[in-house]
Image (tube, rainbow, N blue to C red):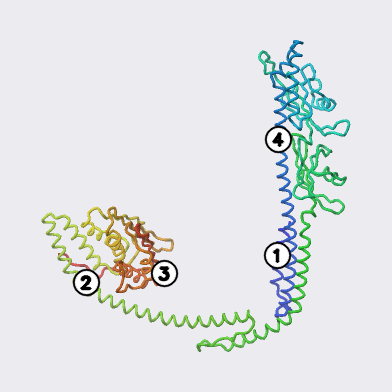
Amino acid sequence: MVTKWASSSIYWIGRLSNMRFGKFNSIRGRFIGSTLLFLFSMGVLISIYNMGFESIIERRAYQAFELLSNEMDRRLAMAINEIDRAAKRVSYSTTVQQFLLTDNPSEYFKLRASATEVLYDSIYSSKTIKSIVLTSRNMNNFYISDPFQEIREKAMAESGLARDITLRKPVVSNVFFHSSGTNGPYFLYFLPVRSILDGHSEKTNIALCSVVVDLKSFTGELSTGISSDSITALIFEDTIINSSRELNVVEQSILLGAKEGRGKANINGEKFLTSSVSIPEFGWRIVSLTSRHSLIGDLFPIRSIGIFIILAAGFLLFFQMQLVLRSVTNPIDQIIRDMRNLTLRKDGVRVSIPKITELARLAEDINDMLERIEISQKEIRKSQWNLYQSMIAQQKAELLSYRSQINPHFLFNTLECVRSMAQTYGVTCIEEICTSMASMFRYSVSSGTIVTLQDEIKHTCDYLKVMSQRFPGKYTIKLDVQPEAMNHPIHAMFLQPIVENSIIHGFAEKMPPCIIRISGQLQQDGSLLLNIADNGAGISDEEIKKINHVNPPTSDHTSHGKTNIGLYNIQQRLKNSFGDQYRFEIRSVKGHYTKVVICIPKALTILSPQFTPPAC
């Protein structure tokens, strides 16, 4: 109900805030409307808070009573088990059963003393047991004393045991009071007794054990509950048999009239919370009564203070409104005039800053926007200049590439001649080196600037074959590339410098196995994600920072300076092609591994080979 009422209030607040009235279109009208809406909203929120707080307190009270009921069930179960053990200790004593079953008068009197001692110990070892009576099949009773004969006979009559002690399982009687009215209440626990002696195999009961139990001692002291004013009572039918404190007539009436489960009562204008739980094993009810005022009484001063604060704030807002309006409208008019006179053709033109903080922030934001526009224009001019310089550098690189294609003609022919001689004389290792070297030269000259990942991997494998001839079996390359990623375009001579760094610097002092793992997969946006990892010596954190900053290596580079040159060239090509859209990252743990992570956007075009070297 609280949630529904809160939702309805919030809905109408939103409707009022969105409505447009002629009088509220001005700043003055909007200030007045905002003040009224603020006061109304605070009233709604305080009401919701009060109702929610009361609901939480009530729920906590019921939860506390449930815990109390569970604890009472546990205590009653333990107490009834104790009574059951005491009854069985008497009923299934060998001495007692011999006494009940003997037909010999001399043996009867001889066993009576021992049986009486067993009965005495069981009664006086428990605070809750007042009397134990054993009734034989011929309805003879054995007891120490029987002051509760009237209660016992009445309970046996109600349980159908007045003339027949046939009983299959233990039974708990109703609650009874002593005829004198000064003691009690009491209830009886009936236990059927079977023979455990040799020679007696009767299937029927040989006796009935009746245990008279003091109910107040049995239930113990009842807890008051969630607060000191709470009342907890144990009720049988229409009688309160135990309570946490003395009760007046009104409290007794509320407790006896409480319904099963949770409920509320109103007595003389005061509201109460009730909770009732039945104990079906005994036919009892545990009822808790708590005054609602005792649960939420501390909330009333807080609510009064909140209402007073809202009213005072409303009056202060009303009287200060005129001053605020005058201090706001003049600076706003000044900002409007400055904006009308503003032009973007002149640099350094700014809006004047008023003294009001909020309007000053607005004017500062406008000036910041003008500053960013001027900076953006300067950056555009700078970017155009950098693009022009990149185009010039690319043209120079193409000229150098054309010039460098002259020498490979001679190298191709020379390597092919050496390979043929090695094949003729049966020198396999030289033949393999020449074959791989020829393939590498052919790739570097014949391929364009952009190639497929498959071509680049083949070129890298040729390089690894050449390096493996020096240390056979030392280097291992493992590929984990998606088939659809093989045709993704990348820069030529892209992977080989990274693998070369792993061999020269990572594996320089490492014993086999020296493993290089290359994995590649396409992302959802079509970009290519490459991971090149080795289990070599690793790179220090300081060196990684220098490489990741894409700074050209200086003449005083470290021991990994050549590594910086190769990786810098790769990053520079990525930056020239993609700007800031690419990803290049080095991860390494010194002495364990190095991993290069590269993400290449799908924005390259595979160029056709420009040169095919002649055969030897």
Tell me the tag on residue 470.
none
Which residue matches tag 2? 405
Question: Which is nearer the N-term, disc 2 or disc 4?
Answer: 4
Mark 3 crowdedness (10 Å alpha carbons): few <14, some 14-19, many ≥20: few
Task: Find residue 27 and report its horizontal and vertical position in percent.
Answer: 70, 80
Query: Compared to 185, does 595 lie above or below?
Result: below
Task: Find residue 243 and report its horizontal and vertical position in percent.
Answer: 80, 42
Q: Left or right: 221 with respect to 397?
A: right
SS under mark 2: loop
Which residue matches tag 3? 581
SS under mark 1: helix
Pointer 2 with pointer 4, Cβ within 8 A:
no
Which residue matches tag 1? 10
The residues bearing labels 2 and 1 have C-alpha atoms spaced at a distance of: 78 Å
Task: Find residue 282 and report its horizontal and vertical position in percent.
Answer: 76, 34
Disc 4 residue type? Ala
Query: Residue drawn 87% across and 34% down?
Result: 182
The residues bearing labels 3 and 1 have C-alpha atoms spaced at a distance of: 46 Å
Mark 4 crowdedness (10 Å alpha carbons): few <14, some 14-19, many ≥20: few
The residues bearing labels 2 and 4 have C-alpha atoms spaced at a distance of: 99 Å
Query: Residue drawn 70% across and 35% down?
Result: 78
Which residue matches tag 4? 77
SS under mark 3: loop
Query: Residue drawn 69% across and 16% down?
Result: 202
Q: In what quadrant of the picture does the N terminus appear?
A: bottom right
Query: Compared to 173, does 406 lie above or below?
Result: below
Disc 2 residue type? Gln
Pick the front one: 415 or 226: 226
Question: Which is nearer the N-term, disc 3 or disc 1?
Answer: 1
SS under mark 4: helix
